[in-house]
Image: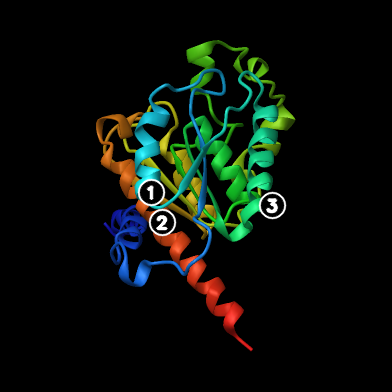
Amino acid sequence: MLVAALLIFVLTAPLARATQGGIGGGNTPPPGPKPQLILFHGGSFLFEDPFFRPSTEPRAIASGFVPHYVTYPLGDMPAAVLAARAAAKTLRAKVGLGRVYAYGASAGGTLAALLSGDGLVSAAVAKAPVSDLVGWEWPLGAYGAGYYEQVGLSLSARYRLSPIRRPQRSPLLIYQGRADRVVPPSMNEAFAAKFPRVYLWSVPGGHTTERARPYLIGKAMHWLERTAAQQARAASHADSLP
């Protein structure tokens, strides 16, 4: 019973943290450039998800972000990672590190997680990211035994580009359906257990739960909005110190 209670606490704590306070008032950031949001679609690094932009863009704007959708190379995950890093560095050069954030779903969530791990964004949200490419077996059944060769990943690259096997420098919120059969929930439970800056929000549904429950995207954007506001206030306070 104690183990079950602790597990429930771990899975619900991010939601509690994400729903404290409201929009506006004390959450209003100081004047300055709007926070910039880099967004990455899913699709197993092979396809582009046509539902991604229509479902995320209005919610990103409503949360005060300027959205930037990255068209990353398909069939070449290492090149996709380079494109993600380049997008983050370009925005950082324009507005500063403290105003750049990331959001991604599935494969795109992996890219967002890598950016937050590298500290190239101030925080990120990932829906069901593949946090351990070494242990991810689903695509072998879906696309064939040569899947990893299809996306340009040797075994050493799978180790090197797995977020769970890298540092985690910036806050990352993961939300994932409890019935997900594409990315096992246990994978991201282990990811969140390893790093104090990774928060796991366990939600109803499967891998595409946000399509049936689009309010989840809004809640995730709201967490990112509050995180951005808190970080902006902290930076403003630090700048005002003698």
Tell me residue 69's x, y (percent): 52, 34
Q: Which kind of residue does numbered mark 3 sit on?
A: Ala
Residues at marks 1 and 3 touching, judged by CB atoms closer than 8 Å:
no
Q: Which residue is mark 3?
A: 93
Query: Which numbered disc flags the more N-terminal residue, 2 or 3?
Result: 3
Q: Which residue is mark 1?
A: 221
Residue occupying image coordinates x 26% and y 56%: 1
For residue 160, side relative to residue 205 (left or right): right
Amino acid type of the residue tagged 1 in the rendering: Met
Report the amino acid beneath label 2.
Glu
Quarter of the figure with the C terminus: bottom right
Which residue is at the front of the view, 9 or 218? 218
Question: Badge 3 local density, few (<14 within 10 Å), some, or many (20+)?
Answer: few
Q: In the rendering, at what x and y percent does residue 145 appear?
A: 59, 12
Secondary structure, mark 2, is helix
Say which mark, if any, is on residue 225: 2
Q: Is residue 91 above or below residue 158?
A: below
N-terminal of the pair, mark 1 or mark 3, is 3
Name the mark nearer the viewer: 1 or 3.
3
Is mark 1 in CB contact (under 8 Å) with mark 2?
Answer: yes
Res 57 seen here: yes
Residue 80 sits above or below residue 6 on the image: above
Q: Secondary structure at mark 1?
A: helix
